[in-house]
Image (cartoon, helix red, strand yellow):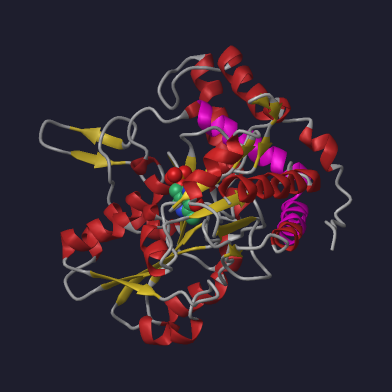
Amino acid sequence: MTYADSSGVDWARIREDFPILREQVRGQPLVYLDNAASSQKPRAVMDALVEFYEHSNANVHRGLHELSSRATDAYEGAREKVARYLGAACAEEIVFTRGTTEGVNLVANAWGNASLKAGDVILLTEMEHHSNLVPWQMLAARTGAQVRYLPVTAEGELALEELDTFLTPAVKIFAFTHISNSLGTINPAAELCRAAKKVGALSLLDAAQSAGHCPVNVREIGCDFLVFSGHKMCAPTGIGALYGRRELLDSLPPWHGGGEMISSVTYEGATFKSAPYRFEAGTPNIAGAVGLGAAIDYIEAIGREAIFAHDSALVDYAQERLAELPGLHVLGPRRGRGGLVSFSMDAAHPHDITTYVDRFGVALRGGHHCNQPLMRKLRLPGTTRASFYFYNTQSEVDRLIEVLQEVQRFFA
Ligand code: PMP
């Protein structure tokens, strides 16, 4: 089998938009396969940041001067782009956050503190990233609610036949990942949200691994909340967003207090702005939001279907080639996975593999991938992960295989 992509996109030209991909690492051309941790940034996003700082920089929503209104327009314009990108009904459904982690913490606090009591259940899955797990455990400790986990099968998929057993009327929220960052599994988000709704539970989708990789539409999926991080989809670090259904967000109390989120303040107390502003206390990451808007423009110009087709073809090819290596075991489903592949090798520990391949300029990730409970369940110390994005190439996969063969020789 060879890498086959029928999108017609000129991926080689697109790769040129990423200056860092021309970097030499340890005297070798960089092969960057750690995109699930963070993606690289195209020139267009960097230019948008420079343009903002050179021509529009000021605080938002405050000053009555020209630069402040330019900055406010840029920031609110980015919110509208995020809303359109996710298929939200309006920009008021989008809260800017630092990323996925902050989005989950916001919901766990603003919604969870007031809504949960002893006996209630927070349903997660066994494949959740720590950021969609620890905030819920902390909420459970505060409220007396219980956290339960929909199991993962030996094939690395959710045990959907057990869904009805777990999704009881005691479940108040079902929070799950769209694409697993360690297994690559794509979960049937719309089906899971429908099932949650049937028992009266809210749903939260962790779109950290999907928002920049495939079409994601909140109304088609039917989730109540969705969280994602900009830095995994060509935007700067420190910016992301929470989507929440408008009437739901409007019904929630603020989480952080401070400037920007109030209507009025006295020495005795305060009243708060409507959503999303009541959730954005203090000066926000204005340039980050502008960068996220530029990243969305960039990704949409390529097309999310084309990106998904490219990543899928590359990961299929990678799986074929990895199968050539004796003693290498790929985790997760064989087909229908996101653009990443996690594996273990009899030859060496994931940390040793990752450190060794770095000598050849190949950037992988090795370890538990913030999935410690899942790794414990799978009885693995961790895995080695190669994760792709649209600028990766078939020859980079070939280079990965060559370097893994070196690993086998070195650790034999
Ligand atoms: N969820 C998933 C599935 C992830 O892959 C990640 C990042 N590895 C996160 C949540 C956390 O994202 P962030 O660190 O950007 O908040």
Residue 12 vertical position relative to residue 226 in the rendered view, above or below: above
Residue 228 in sight here: no
Relative to residue 309, is residue 8 drawn left or right?
right
If the image is split into quadrants, where does the N terminus sit?
bottom right
Task: Write down the quadrant of residue 113 in the picture.
Answer: bottom left
Residue 73 visible here: yes
Q: Is residue 392 left or right of residue 266?
A: right
Residue located 46% across and 74% down the image = 152
* Residue range of the region highlighted in magenta in the rendering: 287-316
* Outermost residue, front side: 412
Is residue 109 shown in magenta?
Answer: no
The correct choice, above or below, for 192 with respect to 214 in the image is: below
Residue 12, quarter of picture: top right
Front one among 25 and 288:
25
Up/down of 147 relative to 139, above or below: below
- Closer-to-camera residue (251/160): 160
